[in-house]
Amino acid sequence: PIEPSPTRSFLHQAGPRKKKKRKKNKKNNSNPTPPATAPTSSNYYGSLQTYTAGEDSSRLATLAKEFGLSRQRLPRPQIRLRVPEYALENLNMSSLKNIYGRMKSFDNEFEEMRLSASLGTPRENDNDADDDENRLLLREDSSMVGLLLTRLPSLDEIEDDEPPATATKKSSAQSPPVNEDPHAAGLGGTLSSATLGIIKGMVGPAILYLPHGFAGAGYLVAIPMLLLSTSLFLWSSGCLLECWKMEMMSRQQQQQHQRQIALSYPELAYRAWGIKGQRLVQIGITLMQSGVCLTYLIFVPQNLRTSALLLLNVDISTTVWLLLMVIVQIPLSWIRDIRRLTVTNLLANVLILFGLLSCLGLAMRQMGESGSVGDESTSFLEEIMYRAKSLPAFNPDGWFLFLGTSVLLFEGSITLLVPLIEAVNTPEDKQKFPSMYRTVIIGIVSFYAFFGTVCWMAIGDSVRTVMTTSLPQGMLATMIQLAYSLAVIFTFPLQNFPSLEIVCASVEKILPKRGVGGKISSSKMLKGSYSEISNGQRNIISSMVVVSLSIVAVLAMDDLDKVVSIMGGLFGCPLAFVFPPLIENELGKGKIGSQKWIVNLVVATLGVGAMFVSTLTTLINWN
């Protein structure tokens, strides 16, 4: 008769033996089963058993010898490999898709960095803030490392979200310490990607408020005030960069086993003044972001009302458009993963660029039309000179509004400063970053002045706060209004996200903690959500925030210029002019000279004065 195959013999023999052994062990619990001996060649297939990785290294070594394998290898623990989105998009794709993938990665990482720069580093125990073991690290504080990456991360640079359950304290103690600094692995951005980050963080719909601000203040007030605010901002940003350098030097002196916290604006405030300073900066950033979202809720209805009047010849109230926008924004505010908003944010960037260039082109064409001088044969240069001479030098009724408007232009830039330099890869680029930053800011402000002056000269003193509603009637003007409206609608959820997370984190302290030890998982940090409250609770909070902003927008629908002035003066001046010099004075005790200490104090005093003058004059003259 034909003998059964070894495989069939193994299947018939291995199963019943296991069951018999289990029954025998249940009956005889006092006598443990002796260790299995090495199988011989005659009964090898009968004694073969299945195994899992890491189960019995001695038995695996014995089986390896039986198979004739001379080299023994320890089993590797299984890991879950997380492949970034930009890695998948950059593999085996056309050049156009490759560019889109890099742009998407840039935008995604930039928004995560904007969020973490606003929130700072969360801590498990605010009462014992000096204990480094109670600090949670934020990977996103330097998430700009994904900007236009030139290589993909290796397996050693990818950490698992949850360690294996079989890991012991002994194995963790023997393993090399994990470097908490996300840049130590060699990832990082270049100066060109940092430049794009500066431009993206600073240029927004606020530039459209400049022509009306110039017309309301006059060029003798608007131009010098814009230069003064730029000088104060550059000095304050230099103070933050000096604080970063001092903290980096102290970080390098730390021992390797100590956990390193990613630096940000709130983190520097914490190191200077403790948890109260960090909360003060976070509250300021929250109110600033909420104020920007409030201006969006006024900007879009006014644009859509003008567009509907031109296209449909129907005058739809701004309240109706605001209600429709709120209906759209409430579900968008429920999104907890900001990576889902990457495509819409990219589209918003394209629409904003189209709107800016189109507005500038229309203004130049409007100035080029002859007839203002009274002679149809006037040249383009003569027309420009005539319009420039006709501009008012000073407007005593609205000059104070430009104080806050000039500060609001720097919204978002001061909070991104430290994460941007943290994300720069090489030390040589880090040394060049301060001069590059000043050059980019001066270039942006110069474009602001050129844009505001040209549009003011083209439209005249009748330019409205939302400049797109003052454009000459035509299909291109309507397209600009619709494009900017869509861009602001797409940008609103990202602008509102940091304030929502801070509000949710405040509510979370009242609610019972969820998760292991109340800690935030790394997967949630990757998604951008910092709070551990349930989705339903967060949806209710986000809906209430949007509705509250819309109620204020209804009351201030016709006073957008005053809202902009309040936002810039009351919230922008402390963040941009007051806190950075004072933080440097506190962190640089014994390290900076007395002269610089006095200059920092003067800059902070000027910031406080600008805040009070802008806020009080706006409130007094509010009709």
Image: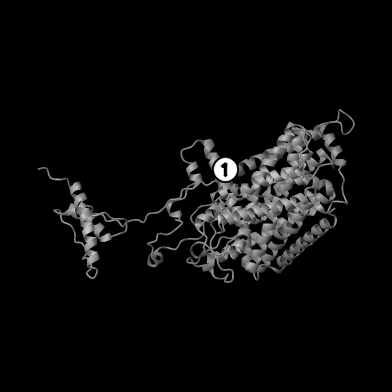
Q: Is residue 308 above or below residue 430?
A: above
For disc 1, the neighbor class at 10 Å (few under 14, some 14 to 19, many from 20) is: some
User: Regarding mark 1 in the picture, which secondary structure is present there?
Assistant: helix
Which residue type carries mark 1?
Met
Classify residue 97 as left or right of residue 160: right
Q: Residue at x 81, y 52 (%)?
A: 401
Q: Residue 419: percent from the left, percent from the top? A: 60, 56
In front here: 128 or 393?
A: 128
Identity of the residue furthest to the right in this view: 374
**Color style of the picture:** one colour
Q: Is residue 24 above or below residue 493?
A: below
Q: Is residue 52 above or below residue 86?
A: below
Identity of the residue furthest to the top in this view: 377
In front here: 381 or 388?
A: 388
Q: Residue 54: percent from the left, percent from the top? A: 32, 58
Question: Could one spot residue 314 in this view of the protein?
Answer: yes
Quarter of the picture holding the N terminus: top left
Q: Residue 300: percent from the left, percent from the top? A: 72, 43
Q: Which residue is mark 1?
A: 103
Q: Residue 502: percent from the left, percent from the top? A: 62, 59
Classify residue 448 as left or right of residue 67: right
